[in-house]
Image (cartoon, grey):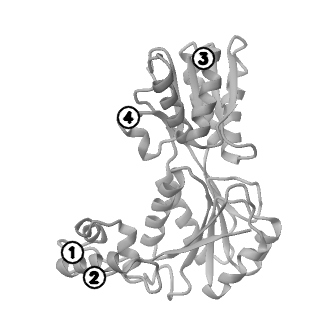
Amino acid sequence: MIFKILNIEIGGKFMSFKKTATSQDVAKLAGVSQSAVSRCFTKGASISSRTKLRVLEAARKLKYKAPNVSSNSASNDDSGLVAVILPYVTSRYYPEVLIELHEALRNGGFRILLITTDDGEELDEKLIQPYLKEKLIAIISATKPTDKFVEDCSQKRIQFIAYNRSWNIPTISSVACDHRNGGQLVAEYFAKKNHKNIGLIEGPKGSFVSDERCKGFKNYLKNYKKIKLNIEKGFFTYEGGYQATEKIINKKVSAIFCADDTMAFGCLDYIKKNTSLKTPSQLEIIGYDDISMSAWDSYNLTTVRQPIRQMSKLATQLINEYIKDPDFEPINHIVQGRLIKRKTTK
């Protein structure tokens, strides 16, 4: 198993006064991302010499002072490290998740270690060994752990939080969107609009989020005997969505649900390039996640929004509760998504 490892940020709360420059101000003046500013002032973090010079110059002009780790949540540099483990996938969803997690954890006074895994892999006990010296206090993971991995974390008092997943492991906490309800929201909309021939583009086999979203969608439509469902797999990729649409469109569907936005982009582009169908008057399309590209003029995609900012804050809250309470019991937070209507539906 190969893991790609990157130290992203060492940060914490800092006092914010009127007219005091922020990291956002420095990033804007330097023409870089906010995380680049954070890395510049983080000992040992990865940043190019050219970028570092631009950030330091901007910080000097703005009289910016880098934040210190808050004593409220971490007593020293070692005790506030949180590992964030995400699948290494082409989806644009995970970078947006990382931005929100980074912001929530940084504001909570924690440092972040990012570890990416190949999609579909499980975490095993070997992963934790290289980082014991770093004194991890928590792991936030969208990658499923083995039972042995969970046991190792528990023995070393490293909190494990499942992010946007619910694996029914009694010893870990979780923060997740209600994926099944999100799929049902889409099905309710299509049924209300009297669609009789509907397409469904699923993610890869074995994907927790795809399975849950599609179960919610299919289970609701079982109540409508006259509705025909045409299913293809798009594997959570743009190309997969494009190719799946080519197969589905020949079945004269009037609506398509894509289990994530990236597949929906491929679906929309296939329709635009290869058919004369008009969206949404002749074909309604709905995605899932509401990543930033969904609102672009070229897509204007109706989609189910996952409240990733709220989820990230809840994950940070769980860590603080775990630190403060020696008798902490695992908590499972389920957050509701909502349908965001744009121009791919009527």
Q: List the residue tagged with mark 1.
A: 20
Residue type at mark 1?
Thr
The spot of residue 72 in percent (x, y) is 46, 80
Tag 4's secondary structure? loop
The spot of residue 11 in percent (x, y) is 43, 77
The spot of residue 78 in percent (x, y) is 55, 87
Q: Are marks 2 and 1 in contact (CB under 8 Å)?
A: yes
Q: List the residue tagged with mark 4.
A: 298
Residue at point 72% right, 81% down?
Answer: 129
Residue type at mark 3?
Val
Q: List the residue tagged with mark 2.
A: 65
Pair 3/1: label in front: 3
Q: Is residue 259 visible?
A: no
Q: Neighbour class for label 2 at 10 Å: few (<14), some, many (≥20)?
A: some
**Which mark sits nearer the N-terminus, 2 or 3?**
2
Residue type at mark 4?
Ser
**Which mark sits nearer the N-terminus, 2 or 4?**
2
**In 3D space, how far apart are the residues under numbered discs 3 and 1 (Cα atoms)?**
56 Å
Residue at point 54% right, 23% down?
Answer: 189
Residue type at mark 2?
Lys
In this picture, is 328 found above or below 177?
A: below
Q: Left of 120 or right of it: where is 8? A: left
Task: Quadrant for residue 241, please give it.
Answer: top right
**In 3D space, how far apart are the residues under numbered discs 2 and 4 (Cα atoms)?**
40 Å
